Image: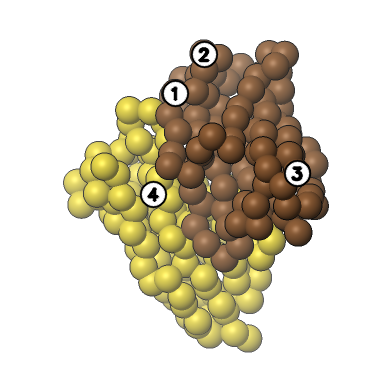
């Protein structure tokens, strides 16, 4: 069964540093997403990406965040100048035309 | 705006008992998802419910969807300790395929 692959599985970074979280969505999916889950809390939508541009973004997704699909297969989330409160599990997901979702296994980001 | 409410948020029960988790959503949605999450782990897809009256079962878990009532339920039959986890429901927004999540139900099953 096709999978969404995320790397790394765990990233520790110092406050103020930039991180890039990587995702390889399912190849024939058209929509790509990043979600975030702070420890013990609910899953929150960050951004959706379609046709090589952002289609929706939440209030959380401010200028600190950016997404890119640099090579037609990878889908990346960049967080500039990380803050302690950015520590969370970040999930990538992709979906086809009908909205069927597949989530990656997540990247646990720890900002120290 | 689509909102999803789950209840209860916390449930402690004995093995062998039955219980139901409820998921209400506020506006029309094409799909309702149930996920399981173990502490510190990823989201495990349990069920996708597509239409009114849909019922799906896997082992001791059964999910149903009533689109008219905007209600989905996750029923646990004869609970066992291995089912201890947090269970999330999520509804798909028709307009942009964004998932709106419930707050999760933390289920603890005591031997």
Mark 1–mark 4 distance (CA, rounded to whole Å): 33 Å
Q: Earlier in the sequence, mark 3 or mark 2?
A: 3
CB under 8 Å between callouts 1 and 2? Answer: yes
Residue at disc 1, secondary structure: strand
Chain (brown): A
Residue at disc 3, secondary structure: loop
Mark 1–mark 2 distance (CA, rounded to whole Å): 9 Å
Instruction: List the residue tagged with mark 1.
Output: A55
Name the residue at 57% across, 53% down: A37
Mark 2–mark 4 distance (CA, rounded to whole Å): 34 Å
Instruction: List the residue tagged with mark 2.
Output: A51
Q: Is residue B5 visible?
A: yes
Point out the frontmost of discs 3 and 2.
Answer: 3
- Tag 3 and tag 2 share a subunit: yes
Pick whichever, B58 or A59, lies toward us.
A59
Pick whichever, B54 or A31, lies toward us.
A31
Count all numbered tags in the image, as a single digit: 4
Point out the frontmost of discs 1 and 4.
Answer: 1
Q: Earlier in the sequence, mark 1 or mark 3?
A: 3
Quadrant in which the C terminus of chain B is drawn: bottom right
- Tag 1 and tag 4 share a subunit: no
Name the residue at 54% across, 34% down: A63
Instruction: List the residue tagged with mark 4.
Output: B55
Q: Tell me the crowding category of disc 3: few under 14, some 14 to 19, or many 20 or more residues within 10 angstroms, Cα based.
A: few
Quadrant in which the N terminus of chain B is drawn: top left
- Tag 4 and tag 3 share a subunit: no
Q: Position of residue A67 (x, y in %)?
A: 61, 27
Q: Is residue A70 left or right of residue B28?
A: right
Q: Colour of chain B?
A: yellow
């Amino acid at each position: 069964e096709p999978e969404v692959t995320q790397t790394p599985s765990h990233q520790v970074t110092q406050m103020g540093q930039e991180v890039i979280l990587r995702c390889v969505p399912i190849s024939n999916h058209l929509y790509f997403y990043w979600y975030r889950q702070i420890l013990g809390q609910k899953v929150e939508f960050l951004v959706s990406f379609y046709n090589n541009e952002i289609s929706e973004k939440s209030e959380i997704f401010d200028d600190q965040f950016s997404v890119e699909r640099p090579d037609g297969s990878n889908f990346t989330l960049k967080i500039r100048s990380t803050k302690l409160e950015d520590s969370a599990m970040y999930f990538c997901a992709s979906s086809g035309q009908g909205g069927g979702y597949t989530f990656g296994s997540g990247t646990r980001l720890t900002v120290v | 705006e689509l909102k999803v409410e789950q209840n209860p948020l916390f449930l402690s029960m004995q093995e062998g008992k039955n219980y139901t988790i409820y998921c209400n959503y506020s506006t029309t949605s094409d799909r309702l998802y149930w996920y399981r999450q173990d502490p510190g782990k990823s989201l495990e897809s349990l069920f996708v419910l597509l239409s009114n009256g849909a019922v799906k079962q896997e082992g001791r878990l059964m999910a149903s969807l009533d689109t008219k009532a905007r209600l989905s339920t996750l029923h646990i039959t004869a609970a066992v300790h291995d089912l201890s986890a947090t269970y999330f429901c999520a509804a798909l927004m028709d307009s942009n395929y964004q998932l709106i999540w419930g707050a999760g139900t933390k289920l603890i099953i005591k031997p």
